[in-house]
Image (cartoon, rainbow, N blue to C red):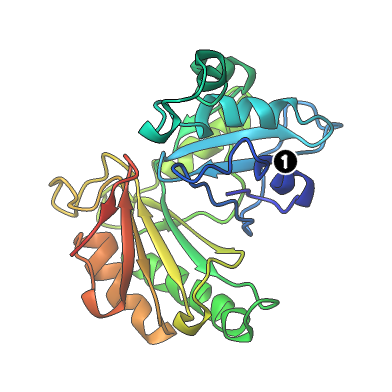
Amino acid sequence: MYSSTSKEMENETSSNQCKKPFHNISVLNSSFPSSAPPRTEVQSTSAYLLPSFKYVPFLPRVSFDSVQALAKSYLLPEKLHAAHDGLSPIHRDRLTRKPAYQNLLPGVQDVRDVLVLICGHGGRDARCGTFGPLLRDEFEAKLVRANFEVARGAVRVPGFGKGEEDAGAAQKVIAAHGEDGKKKEVARVGLISHIGGHKFAGNVIIYIPPGYRGPGGEEHALAGCGIWYGRVEPRHAEGLVDETIVRGRVVEDMFRGGIDSNRRILRL
């Protein structure tokens, strides 16, 4: 999922190399701002990899080498489906992941923020275009009420961008505390391009990062998972924040599906 819109990047990542019937990858644009690149004269975009919970901050738009590195190091499968057994060893090798390419992508880091993704593509469905901004504002308000730090700016990467001052600012956000002295968790709410099922507008996907803890410090039941809800209205935001994000419970009557960090489908 790209943080800033770039049709060229989307087309390149959606090439035949990543369109495999047994390893589907969906490429979406989002309203999240991209991280500032180390070289300000080079235009770049950023990408979230979900449900792998990785953030790739710098993908230069002037060359597709970094996009190819992204596909080969993170997007291709580690192991091929049995349907590929008839291919030659060389062909099979081309279709599998190569971790060495990760060295070509500086600043990649784990996603530690709660992500709330809302379909806001008005060009595909007027209802999503109408509901999207309303849901975004309502989720942000209810997350703040639930003692979350809602981050709206770009992700700052320590050691990159404008320097260590930005890295320090990022740490201040992450370490923010509420009036009760407890550490605030960070959440980001963004609009994304069409995710299908217009009759289910508004569509909301909530990603809880691995290692996320509940309000009492207990292990969160949905840590490392993505939960997809449909027919969400602004009046539902408070309940979804409390039930799913805070307490780790799935609201069954709006549940459309889910996935864990190992790409396994969640079923109720």
* Amino acid type shown at disc 1: Glu
- Quadrant in the picture for residue 134: bottom right
Q: Nearer the viewer, residue 22 or 166?
A: 22
Q: Is residue 209 found left or right of 33 in the rendered image?
A: left
Instruction: Look at 26% across and 50% down and name the residue there.
Output: 181
Q: Is residue 204 found left or right of 259 in the rendered image?
A: right
Instruction: Look at 51% across and 31% down and name the residue there.
Output: 76
Instruction: Look at 32% across and 64% down and name the residue there.
Output: 257
Task: Please provide percent x and percent y for residue 199.
Answer: 48, 84
Q: Which of 171 and 122 is in front in this view?
A: 122
Taking the image as drawn, is residue 244 in sight? yes
Task: Please provide percent x and percent y for residue 185.
Answer: 34, 50
Answer above or below: position of 190 versus 132: above
Taking the image as drawn, is residue 163 in sight? no
- Quadrant in the picture for residue 82: top left
Q: Nearer the viewer, residue 55 or 88?
A: 88
* Quadrant of image for the C terminus: bottom left
Answer above or below: position of 63 versus 219: above
Instruction: Decide: few, some or many residues near mark 1? Use Cα within 10 Å; few <14, some 14-19, many ≥20.
Output: some
Q: Of helix, strand and loop, which one carries label 1? A: helix
Residue for badge 1: 12
Task: Please provide percent x and percent y for residue 26.
Answer: 54, 52
Q: Is residue 260 found left or right of 111 in the rendered image?
A: left
Instruction: Look at 74% across and 25% down and name the residue there.
Output: 65
